[in-house]
Amino acid sequence: MFMGEYQHSVDDKGRLIVPAKFRDTLGEKFVVTKGLDNCLFVYPQAEWANLESKLKALPLTNANARAFARFMFSGATEVEVDKQGRITLPQTLRDHARLDRDVLVIGVNTRAEIWSVEEWKRYQDQAGESYEEIAEKIVDLGI
């Protein structure tokens, strides 16, 4: 399980140190893709395979299913951790998440997310006002 919040920097070559606490769960190779809310989603291989199976099972005739599959797969890339614990993020993914220098890597249960510090603050400011309301709306999901 991924949890916690870790501040790191992206260097001039697009490299980012993966938090040490996440490395064992992620493994040597894992998948990074475009995420929702202007962040990147980070999946261990097994979790990516699980998501891939679910996306394959969606009906091809459903426009929303096609759009979401395109979004997830078009931005996906397999990355490998180097000897210094870094990964290289492609420019297209950095652009999607508006990553410049300072980033946060956060744990979200079965995946990690990579956020620009500014986007995370903006998200927190917006969502923070409505967490109680959100909790009330998802109570029917069995939480």
Image: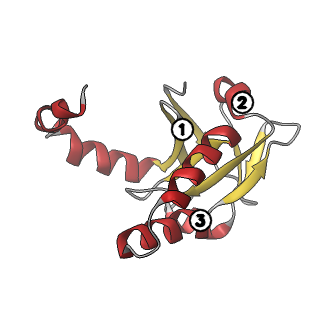
Secondary structure at numbered mark 1: strand
Q: Is residue 63 visible?
A: yes
Q: Are dots 2 and 3 in contact, CB under 8 Å?
A: no
User: In the picture provided, is 139 more to the left or to the right than 32?
Assistant: left
Name the image quarter holding the N terminus: top right
C-alpha separation, residue under disc 1 versus residue under disc 3: 16 Å
Q: Amino acid at mark 3?
A: Phe
Residue at (54, 38) in percent of width and height: 111
Residue at (36, 70) in percent of width and height: 64
Residue at (34, 45) in percent of width and height: 121
Q: Amino acid at mark 1?
A: Arg
* Residue 123 sits above or below residue 109 on the image: below
**Residue 111 bears which disc, if any?**
1
Dot 1 or dot 3: first in sequence order is 3
Secondary structure at numbered mark 2: helix
**Frontmost residue, 86 versus 111:** 111
| Residue 94: x %, y % from top left | 59, 62
Write down the quadrant of residue 37 in the picture: bottom left
**Frontmost residue, 99 versus 87:** 87
| Residue 47: x %, y % from top left | 61, 40
- Provide the residue designation for mark 3: 73
Residue at (37, 73) in percent of width and height: 62
C-alpha separation, residue under disc 2 versus residue under disc 3: 23 Å
C-alpha separation, residue under disc 1 versus residue under disc 2: 12 Å
- Provide the residue designation for mark 2: 23
**Frontmost residue, 13 versus 91:** 91
